[in-house]
Image (spheres, helix red, strand yellow):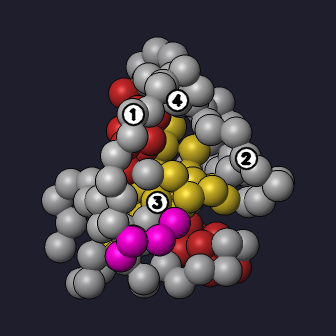
Amino acid sequence: MIYGLSGQIRYYLYAPSTDLRKGFDALGGIVRNELLQDPLCGDAFIFINRRRTLLKLLVWDQTGFVIFYKRLESGTFEIPSRKNGNKSLVISREELVMILEGISIEKVKRRKRYLSTNFVE
């Protein structure tokens, strides 16, 4: 059951642009075939269109798939830089919120925080 952005799951940002006319099955197919992940694992998978004005987040909540969908009326979503040319990158819940709110991720200065070793990125 997911009602918000949990810090207990991983967020995978799919780096290539995605045709966001795709629905549950097609996005789940990208997760399974291109990211080699199980879409039923409970982690969230984030897709952004080429113009970076649309964002879909796909997650399995133990009873079915949920899609969160955001369309910007102006501006674009910032995509963090990829390392090693991977098709996806793991981002934190905080980075996802910054992407959704239009905050520049590259210019954010992070202060030291304790991170539990139970959650590995």
Query: Is label 4 in a helix, a strand or a loop?
Result: loop
Residue under the image location 67 percent in, 80 percent down: 36
Q: Which residues are magenta?
A: 117-121
Name the residue at 56% across, 58% down: 90
The answer to if 109 sits in the magenta stretch is: no
Q: Secondary structure at mark 2?
A: loop
Q: In front: 93, or 117?
A: 117
Tag 1–tag 3 contact (CB < 8 Å): no
Q: Amino acid at mark 4?
A: Ile
Marks 1 and 4, how far apart at CA: 14 Å
Whether the residues at callouts 1 and 2 have beta carbons within 8 Å, the answer is: no
Q: Which residue is mark 3?
A: 11
Q: Amino acid at mark 2?
A: Arg
Q: What residue type is disc 3 on?
A: Tyr
Residue 121 appears at what percent x and percent y? 52, 66
Q: Quadrant of residue 62?
A: bottom left
Marks 4 and 2, Cα distance to the nearest angstrom? 13 Å
Q: Which residue in the protein does label 2 denote? A: 82
| Cα distance in 3D space between marks 3 and 4 | 15 Å
- Within 10 Å of disc 4 (Cα), the crowding (few <14, some 14-19, many 20+) is some
Which circle's residue, 1 or 4, is located before the other in the chain? 4
Which residue corresponds to mark 4? 105
Q: Out of 88 and 83, give the one closest to the viewer.
A: 83
* Secondary-structure class at tag 1: loop
Read off the residue under disc 1: 111
Q: Residue furthest right?
A: 85
Which of pointers 4 and 2 lies earlier in the amino acid sequence?
2
Could you classify mark 1 by the number of other residues whose Cα lies within 10 Å: few (under 14), some (14-19), or many (20 or more)?
few
Query: Which sits earlier in the primary sequence, circle 1 or circle 3?
Result: 3
Q: Position of residue 75 (x, y in %)?
A: 51, 17
Q: In the image, which is nearer the foreground, mark 3 or mark 4?
A: 4
Q: In this view of the protein, which residue sits in the foreground, 9 or 54?
A: 9
